[in-house]
Image (cartoon, coloured by chain):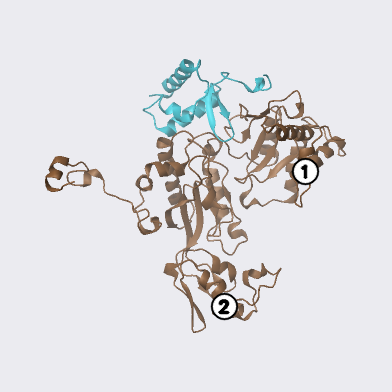
Amino acid sequence: MAKHATPLLDQLESGPWPSWVSDIKQEAETRAKNVKGIDYQIPVDVCDDLLGLMELTYVEKRTHWKHGGIVGVFGYGGGVIGRYCDQPQQFPGIAHFHTVRVSQPSGKYYTSAYLKQLCDLWELRGSGLTNMHGSTGDIVFIGTTTPQLEEIFFELTHNLNQDLGGSGSNLRTPSDCIGTSRCEYACYDTQSLCHALTLDYQDELHRPAFPYKFKFKFDGCPNCCVASIARSDMSFIGTWRDDIRIDQKAVQAYIGGELKPNAGAHAGRDWGKFDIVKEVLSLCPTQCMKMDGGKLVIDDRECTRCMHCINVMPRALRIGQDTGVSILVGAKAPILDGAQMGSLLVPFVKVEEPYDEIKEVIENVWDWWMEEGKNRERLGELIKRQGFQKLLEVTNIEAMPQHVQEPRSNPYIFWREDEVPGGFERDITEFRKHHQR
Amino acid sequence: MDKEAGKKAVVEFLTKKSKSKSKFYLKDFYEVIPEEKPRDVKNLVNEMVKEGTLEYWSSGSTTMIGLKGTGKQASAEDEA
């Protein structure tokens, strides 16, 4: 018998999809039965009280969580988010319900033994509820009490070889795709770069350094599996500067039907015979592909790296061999000003250890943002406020055609007042002598 | 300005403001020691947290910093 009646939450279990309500109920039941004989360090009924509180929230249509607090682990300014319930008498199991962000491994590779260790720790010292993974990529442990925080931190760092992630006005846990470890599209070793920058910027990750949050994300190719272009203040997207490699025999095999388009991903339905013109050539956003006497021809100078042709015919088309990374800046979700996608800052840079060229760009951007950014202003908002031109100035990057989105949309003006004879001020009386209104 | 003078200026600033406000953004500290670079102020403030003079407050998305013991404390969060 559940501790609290939850008729509104129960409705959320009635749809065809997996339900988080069922998951929490399952954990509540497991804790109540305690077949494994775990010496729970936080209230056994934490999950029951969580369901009860959420039901109350649905009935009243108001939240009962207080916002933030002074909790953390010694020496760290991020990684723990204090959450307190404002109805502790009614729901004592969740009077404290802090979140712990745990840094996820690069590429999110785990062994099952390691996952079991994480789960065992969280059953013992937390609610048992996790979010694998949070939006930024961290392993998110949901719900524990203040006295458990240092214990959890000790276990993670001493026995599980694991660090906390970022929260607050810190560098957030950098996240990456699987990169060259398994993916033929990867243009650079995302895991190596992600790991190196995580180690280099430990101070920024664990101690508040900025006006607001800052996110790095690393995508091995323009398919953007970690959506860096939409979600990170600084996005690293793999690219190439030579030509797409074409295997003309494989192109013919796709046309002839011997090879299945999209590696057979759409095999659940009969879409008819593969039509290269309809499904590839005419979908190219820059129209840079054509068939010429039975041969596929690509004008690589016009290619925008949309990846569509490579995704449809992976056996026939491969990324180029002179690979590197494009750096984009300023993406964010809509809190102020609305959502923004990243803007291209560095069109191409080779990804070579010790990554000094990349770090120089990062640190120039940080210095500017730390100095000029307002409280709670993301990098993308500062770029909008002071101009992309200013960003180019602080990063010592020359303006180039790739920075212009389209003709006449953002033609940056690079004249400074001191370079113009007479400056930007004019004598209006003198002007009017020659020009009528 | 040397480090000790910087720390003193930070504590004075926070003590003066403590009646009206207990938590501040990192950027607010830049104005307390305007001659120092933002990165040095950040390092100083974080060092003062490590020493136990200051403490962090976090909403999860933003971090604020105040004198240790001022404002609402974690131990009193479940009080009305």
In the image, residue A340 sits, relative to residue A127, either above or below, namely: below
Q: In this view, does A306 lie to the left or right of A390?
A: right
User: At 54% from the left edge and 79% from the top edge, which residue is drawn?
Assistant: A248
User: At 40% from the left edge and 36% from the top edge, which residue is drawn?
Assistant: A372
Residue A37 visible in the current orientation: no
Give the secondary structure at mark 1. helix
Q: Is residue A388 left or right of residue A110?
A: left
Q: In which quarter of the image is the N terminus of chain B?
A: top left
Residue A11 image label: 1
User: At 45% from the left edge and 64% from the top edge, which residue is drawn?
Assistant: A241
- Disc 1 marks a residue whose amino acid type is Gln
x, y percent for residue A186: 56, 61
Q: Do the dots labelled 2 and 1 sit on one chain?
A: yes
Quadrant hosting residue A426: top left
Residue to which mark 2 is pinned: A251
Q: Which of marks 2 and 1 is nearer the N terminus?
A: 1
Q: Mark 1 lies on which chain?
A: A
- Disc 2 marks a residue whose amino acid type is Val
x, y percent for residue A266: 67, 68
**Colour that chain B carries in the picture:** cyan
Q: Give the class, few, some or many, for how many residues have Cα within 10 Å of label 2's Cα (few <14, many ≥20).
A: many
Q: Which chain carries label 2?
A: A
x, y percent for residue A389: 35, 48
Q: Residue furthest bottom?
A: A293
Give the secondary structure at mark 2. helix
Q: Which residue lies furthest to the front in this view?
A: A437
x, y percent for residue A43: 78, 29
Q: In this view, does A111 lie to the left or right of A310?
A: right
